[in-house]
Every structure is written in structure tokens, then in C-alpha cells.
Image: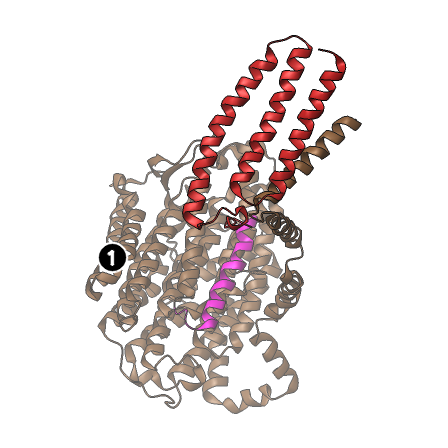
Chain colours: A brown, B red
Amino acid sequence: MENYIWLIPALPFLGSLLLILFGTRLSRTAVAILGVGSVGISALITILLGLQFLSEKPAFYHQEVWQWFSVAGFNPSIAFHLDALSTVFIFVITFVGFLIHLYSTAYMADDSDFPRFFACMNLFVGSMLKLVMADNLLLLYLGWEGVGLCSYLLIGFWYKEPANGYAARKAFIITRVGDTAMAIGLFILFQTFGTLNIQTILTEAPEVWSVGTQMAVLVGLLLLGGAVGKSGQLPLQTWLPDAMAGPTPVSALIHAATMVTAGVYLIARMYVIFDLAPVAQLAVAIVGAVTLLLAGFSALTQYDLKRVLAYSTISQIGYMFLALGVGAWSAGIFHFMIHAFFKALLFLCAGAIILALHHEQDMRKMGGLRKRMPVVFWTFLIGAASLAALPVITSGFYSKDQILWYTLAGPQGSIWLYMAGLAGAFITSVYTFRMVFMTFYGEEKTHVAHPPGKVITIPLVILAILSLVSGFIELPHNFAHVALFSGLMAPVLPGITANELLAANEWMFQLIAAVISLGGVFVAYLFYQKSPALLASIENSSFAMALHRFWFSGWGFDALYDNLFVRPYVFLANLNKRDIIDSFYTGLAQMAEGFHVMFSQTQSGVLRNYVAGIVVGAIMILTISLLL
Amino acid sequence: MNVSTMEAALLLAGVLFMLGLISVLIRRNVIFMLISVEIMLNAAGLAFIVAGSKWVQPDGQVMFIFILTMAAAEVSVGLALILQIYHQLKTLDSDAASFMKG
């Protein structure tokens, strides 16, 4: 089976290529079969390979397809390295990707650019697979930029709306800031190790750098810069809420389940660097903790269903960063997997609602959808419960509890990070159930045109089941002690041991997390279901209104960047509008043209003038030669 | 050859040359211009002959034969061009042939 590894990224690329070349000439059915089928077969190969991986338990599978190029001792190859970490990622990418592609055939059915959509989606899946399977950082970077390009193409998919094009450019440019930092990090790594092969770097790094070396910290921070840009973390998070301009399946696949977690993958993949750079690792944890709080507060105030989910994604990735930052590597990846399931589910449910309500995204105009769309309601409820980490039954509880636990009890844990995580958990559960109550309860405000069909509901049901049961592969020690996931991760990522003093009382902290989560649901119920008057009385105070505006605008980051970077840049651009520097070159050209006009005057066409010219010239030369 | 004869001969050559040059400059008829060029060439040739006999060297006469040959070639090309100009423009006025002015 391991000989077919290359097929996993190759098939979506092939699908994309065929759709780009012949997409407009094919029927819609053929486009759908090609687009969904390529990812489907990839998913099938991945599952078979995953089963083989689980039964054989090798350290990794490695396949070199061909040598990319070879220049002065730098010879990266197109080679795939498949260990437990990348296997989890490719499983999520292909399987969730397949479900979202399937869903898209119904969601995009009426769109005139049907082939273009699937071509971009397939290209995205291929690039993302390349990113997580690459055995060297250069190939990883190629995939990294590939997903950035697809993200740009798909956010601006409905490009006739200028706002969508603006959002696409914003996403592209802001992530580029992080990518540049990452590229510089790669340059330093290459300069130090003479190779970009990931495994070589990971084994050699501890020999070259001692713990806390300035160089290691620098590389760690630069890689964090790349991760922060891609994953929508502070301070480069402003693009992600605007990225919701794209079609909803795109938001589900790219801006919730896969691409935005590339930063998490990068940090986990290069964990040795962060082990050697405790400062950089602490920075990861702090970025995660601050981001999860900021994004959570912003999510509380949004009215656009998709924007709530976008801020929630930023916040949940903050949790993953927090986990990575305190050294709970496996917990971070576990939360990535669970998050991919329930957040894709929530986005797809949101898409089903938006489609049924004629592209209405404002939650204030929704309501009472519980009776009208029962399947969507129940699956959304499961996704929301998982996001809010309702105890025992949802998988989100197990992954988030693990993160919170190690944030406190891990060797690098701290009470502050724990408090931030706990506060974030409370906010998460409030905004999640605010969403549920505003959308599905109360009176019906917009009529449901047509309930979603089977192609839309089947992926929802599958993802809902996964959101419920996938948590059971990793249960807390004092519960049942199932550690399938961390066991799988053990050969790739270092484990973590909890503080023994605290470990005795682990159940107490689980209880706190459970109470916090349920408390959030109760608050949401109180404000948005039982007595909206109470909420209104709080909201009407001037302080609350100002705070609401502040949070609604995402903590004013957009305005800040606008004043700090965009306006000065536009000012300079306006200054240079008349090409000040160019004037030197245009001056040269004008001078040449002046001479041309002058000399062409002498071409009178009168033979005698020419003769006179020759005579005068000859006399001049003779005179000069006589005088000198 | 004594000095006064040589000076007189060179003066003759110079006068001939200037006559040719002036008539090239002031004549508009192409045939007259061609003839004037011939006069200038022969003036130069005369100067060569004078110089050759002064230093008793054959080079001056050799150079004159070169000039004669070159003049013959030039005249044949020049006459062909003149014929074409006349054929195209129905005039021999050189100022009329100014299509290529800048």
C-alpha cells in the first residue's frame, strides 16, 4: 500500500488539471464526478493506508517520487514522509474534504462557475496534502503557498462583488506577511544545517543548538510568524472573518477544517526547534491564549452566522496553539482533528441554512428553524455541543479538557494560561448557544424556501456522528484511560506528564470545566431564550454599546492596521503617483527625442545642403588639425 | 621641376577644385553637379601628378590612374541614377528629389 502514497496528493491535482483544461466542456454531472471522485479515491487510499499504518505500526512510510532539482549541494526531492502526525492530517483533509466536496455538488448546483469551483477545490486539497506529506521544508513551502493561492481564488470566487475581491486580496496580503517571516526562517535553517529535510533538521538541531540559543529562538519565532499568518492568530487574524465572503463549503474546508490549521501542523512538525527555544514556545502559548479570548469576545457580538463561526475558528485554533505552547503536542493535534469534524459540520449546517433562506446570513432574521429543518437542527446542535465542550457526550469536551488540564498541570503550564483557557471555554459556550437559540428557536422570521436534500444532509449526519464518537479514542486517565490517540502520536511527538500533586485531583478540574461549559449554555439560554429583556437592559447602557461596537469590529484591529499601514502606504503611493523616480528615465527619453527632432531637421533632402555640410565639416576638421 | 612652376600648378589645381566645389554647391541641375564633381576629382588628380613629379616618384601617377578608374565607375553609377531621377520626376532639378527629408 505504501507504494501508492504519491497517489493521495496526485489524484486531486489530476482532477484539478482536467477540470481546468476541459471543465467548461464537460457536463455538470461529469464535473461533479471528476471533482468529488478524485478526492474520494484519495480518501479511500488514505483510509486503507491508515488501517495498514495502524496494524503494522511502522515509525513512518517514506516514498521518494523524484528529485526536484540539485543545485550546489542543495537537492530537495519530491518525497513524502508519512508518520502518525501527517497520517492524522491527511485523513482529516481527504475524508472531511470528500464530504465537503460531496456537499458542494448540491450547494453550488445553481452556480454558473461550477467547474471553476471544483478545479480550485481540488487544487486546494492537492496542495494541502502536499503540505502535510512533504519530507522537506521546501516542498512544504510549495504546498503552503499553494493553499494560500487557492484560499485567495476561493474567497474571491464570486468576484463580481467588489467586497469579495477586497476580502480575497486582504487574506492573500496578510498571510503573505507571515509567509515572508517563515521563508526567512527557512533560509536560516538552510544556512545552519545545509539541508531542508525535516527529519535531518529535527535530529541535528539538538546537536547544533543548545537550549535557549538565540538562533533557535529566532527560527522558532519566525516559524511562529508563518503559523500565525496562516492560522489567523494574533496579530495577523484580521483576514479570517472577512474570508467568509467565499462560498460556505470553502469556509468549511479551508477556513475551518484544514488550511487554517497548517500553522498548528508546522509548529508540531518542527517541535524540536520549539523545545530548544523555550521563549518561542512560550510565545506560542501566549499568542494562543490571547487570541482565544479576543476572538471569543468578538464572536459574542457578531450577527452574521458565518462570522460567528469564523471568530470561533480563530478562538479554537488559539486553543491548539495554547496546547502546543505548553508542550501538550498530542492534545493540540487531537483538538485539531475534533475541531475539523465539528467546525466543518457547523459550517455545512450554516451553509444549509443560508441556502434555504436565499443567502440570508443575518441571525437576527433567522429563528424558529428547528421545526422546518430538523436534520440540520439536530446535527447543528451536536456540532454546537461539541464546540461548547458539553461534558461526557461530546468529543469536544475530551479534547478541550485535555488542553485545559495540561495548561495547568503540564510542566510548562501556568495558572494564567489556565484561567484564560477557562474563560475562553465559558465564552465559547455562550456564543455557541447564542447562535443555536437565535437561529433555531423563537418565531420564524424568514420563510424556508426549500428544505435541504439528501446530498446536503448525508455529510452532516456523518460529521455529526464523528463529532460525537471520535472523542472516545482519547479519554482522561481517571475516566477509562483510553489513550489510543496519544499512543499513536507517541513515536512522533514527545509525551507530557502532569504534575502529580494536581493529578490526584484531576476530577475536580474536569468538574470545573464541565460546570463552566454548562454555565455558558445556561447564560445563553437566559439571555436569548428566557428573558431577552434582561439582555436588552444590559445592552442599552452606553458602556455596553461602546464595548459591543469595539468587539464587533474585532477589537479595532482593522482600524489600527488601516491607520498604521494602509493609509501611510496609500499616502506614499499618491505622492509617487506622478512617478518621481521615473522622471529621471522619462527625462532621458525626452532628451533623446529632442535630439532626434533636432537632427531630423538637418535631413532636408536637398543635395546641396548635404554637400555644404560636408564642406563645412571638412574645413572645421582641417582647421582643428592645423591649430593643434 | 622648379618651385615657381609647382606653385603655379598647385594653384591651378586649387582653383579648379574650388570652381568645382562652388558649382556643386550652387548648381541645381544634377548633370552639372556630376560634371562639377568630375572637375574636383581631376583637380585632385592634378595635385597628385604635381607632387609625383616634384619628388620624382611614380606614386602620383599611379594615384591618378586610380582616380580615373574610380571616376569612370562613379560616372556610370551617377548617370544611371540621373536617368532614373529623370524617369521618375521628369526633371533634373536635384531639389525636387527630396522625398527622404526628415
Q: Quadrant of residue A347?
A: bottom left
Which residue reaches farthest right? A627
Residue A434 location (% of width, % of height): 46, 79
Residue located at (65% from left, 11% from top): B53
Q: Nearer the viewer, residue A233 or B46?
A: B46
Task: Say above or below: A48 vs A213.
Answer: below
Give the labeled residue for mark 1. Answer: A22
For the question of whether residue A325 can be seen, the reply is: no
Q: Residue at x 54, y 68 (%)?
A: A295
Q: Is residue A595 magenta?
A: no
Counting from the top left corner in percent of width and height, residue A409 is at 55, 54
Q: Nearer the viewer, residue A142 or A418?
A: A142
Left or right: A391 with respect to B94? left
What's the chain of the residue with tag 1? A
**Residue A495 in view of the camera:** yes
Q: Position of residue A556 (x, y in %)?
A: 61, 71
Q: Magenta region, mostly helix, strand or loop?
A: helix
In the rendered structure, which segment of residues is drawn in magenta? A158-181
On the image, the x and y values in percent for residue A309 come to 45, 70
